Image: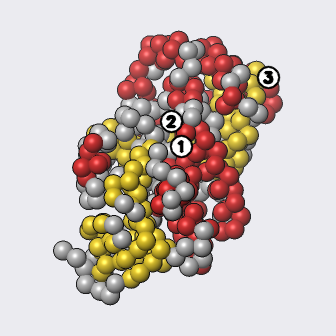
Amino acid sequence: MAGKGPQTTTDLVVVGAGVVGLGCALAAVRRGLKVVVVERDARANGASIRNFGFITVTGQQAGAMWRRARRTRDLWAEVADAARIPIRQTGLLVPVRRPEAAAVLEAFVQGEMGERCRLLDRAALADRAPELAGRELIAGLWSPHELRVESREAIPALTRWLEAQGVDFRWSTAAHAVETGRVHTSRGPIAAKAVAVCPGDDLVTLFPDRLADAQLLRCKLQMLRLADPGFPLSAPVMSDLGLVRYAGYAALPEAAALRARLEREQPDELAAGVHLITVQGAGGELVVGDSHDYGATPDPFGHAAVDRLILDEWSAVFGRPAPPVLERWTGTYAWSPHGPALIEAPLEGVALALVTTGAGASTGFAIGEEVVASLLGEGSPA
């Protein structure tokens, strides 16, 4: 049933105030367009704040995803300055403890996506990051390309800045139906020249047939916030397990031997989709994760055994027990077996866009640019 209320007229309606929706709003504002954002929640509450805030370039899938990650990184740097969003960390360290993992890193730095990355031997790794005290560490990768923000502060800050630029946010407002030139919401219709539907992991409300055709599932992840370990982190950290999850590494021929060894040595981690990311906040606390559990509706519970796998991997890299856990949470995002993003035009003047892997912070702004460009006739959804 359509909501009651006067009709609003605008240039662009964005359905969804997650990172892709905000990317669309940002791209539209930069073109001087009037924008209304419709969001069913009262504030940012989904995957866009339940993550590392880690804008990851290195290791992303070759092609469109890598290009989007580089562009999104640049846009984050620009908007962070304008919106006074602190960049908490830069760069990436990938310390590894297996010769097979070192071989993957060596192959990676020799390719196009390894530009400006540096392979570190044991001594160079210890010199750059003395906090990495795992006795088995034999090599590492340093990348200068990454940025890290605190998502739970960055997304609200970006929203406030967009509001200051004239974006009209309609919180606690559901979009019931979309047609060419109009969005029907719980607070009345909105007429618009164009509509961008950015549903996150809501796979049934708008254009469910299109989303069903993409064979989408939800991915549940588990994450932890740890107390200050008593040392500064030189950069965000990944480990051996990430080299078989991130397609930029995993697609290399050398990754097959690493996967075979991990299947022997860490089968529980692979089964739970565990790999290590560690980032640090302004107060010294760490955000650590994560895991991956796929289903139409994954259970909402955090499992202690999965947390233990994550913390054990942390201890193997840092060579000490993990600090006390301050917070635990789960998040979900849309996932597709067919690629890292879905961008379609289900109707004339309407775009449907969502990230279909765990890289919203890393690619969402670039996707927003592509969506707005396509709606303005500057290109077609890819």
At label 2, which amino acid type do we have? Answer: Leu
* Contact flag, marks 1 and 2 (Cβ < 8 Å): yes
Looking at the rendered image, the quarter that the N terminus falls into is bottom left
Residue drawn at 52 percent across, 52 percent down: 379
| Location of residue 176 by image quarter | bottom left
Residue drawn at 53 percent across, 24 percent down: 250
- 139 relative position to 36: left or right: right
- 325 relative position to 117: left or right: left
Tell me if mark 2 has few (under 14), some (14-19) or many (20+) residues whose alpha carbon lies within 10 angstroms of its own: many
Residue 93 position, x and y percent, is 68, 34
Which mark, by number, is residue 311? 2
Q: Secondary structure at mark 3?
A: helix
At label 3, which amino acid type do we have? Answer: Ala
Q: Is residue 213 visible?
A: yes
Q: Is 132 located above or below residue 167 in the figure?
A: above
Which mark, by number, is residue 123? 3
Image depth: mark 2 or mark 3 in front: 3
Q: Is 59 located above or below residue 378 in the figure?
A: above
Residue drawn at 55 percent across, 57 percent down: 378
